[in-house]
Amino acid sequence: MTRPLVITDCDEVLMHMVVPFAEWVDAEHGVLFRIEDASFAGALKRKECGTPLEAAEVWPLLDAFFRGEMARQYPIPGALEAMAAIAEQADIVVLTNVGPEHQQARIEQLALHDFHAPVIGSRGGKGEPVRRLIEQYQPSVALFIDDLAGHHHSVAQEAPDVWRLHLVGEPAIADKIAPAEHAHARIDDWAAAQDWILARLAENVPAPAPEPV
């Protein structure tokens, strides 16, 4: 009998990212990070003049952060404890959009907090990698956790039988992000999220098909 499978994002789900990133770009690059809408790029502004950074300037900053500053990140309250409880019932895979080049650093980062699970550093929509993981693990039931609505849409298209939990663990941005239309639930507190996840695993049934429009 195959075990359930939980596929989870990392940044703002397991680990704080925007707050340590904001502190770093302020101190080292003279850039303020202020989320005023759903646009990550639009939240980055030059301190001296307040103009937003160009989109092409954003990824090099993110890349530099993940390349050398991941030690600044710290766990979302309750996340790793919940993962330990969930691991008793399910296999866990971390699917993170830091890209293949930062995959090993992410493994090492999580290991420092005594969290050990397979990590996949992906790019783009997560639907296809989730589908491949389902094909690989053949789980009895599968569940996906992410803070970005676009990934829930992608998974809904590619692997509709997977339960989808929208979780934004960073309070600084949670109230600025609307619930993902293609998620089955929105829960930002890990104690409540753990209960919801374990209930889905115990039910052991696929996620319901979307209602016809």
Image (cartoon, rainbow, N blue to C red):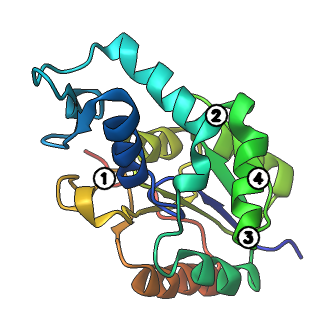
Name the quadrant containing residue 167. bottom left
| Residue assigned mark 4 | 107
| Residue assigned mark 2 | 67
Name the quadrant containing residue 98. top right
**Would you say residue 134 is visible in this rendering?**
no
Q: CA distance from mark 4 to mark 1?
A: 27 Å
Front residue of 117 and 141? 117
Q: CA distance from mark 1 to mark 2?
A: 30 Å
Q: Earlier in the sequence, mark 4 or mark 1?
A: 4
Seen in the image, is 35 located left or right of residue 211?
left
Q: Residues within 10 Å of mark 1 (few under 14, many from 20)?
A: many
Q: Earlier in the sequence, mark 3 or mark 4?
A: 4
Q: Secondary structure at mark 1?
A: loop
| Residue assigned mark 3 | 115
User: Is 70 located above or below residue 111 in the figure?
Assistant: above
Q: Secondary structure at mark 4?
A: helix
What is the quadrant of the C terminus in the image? top left
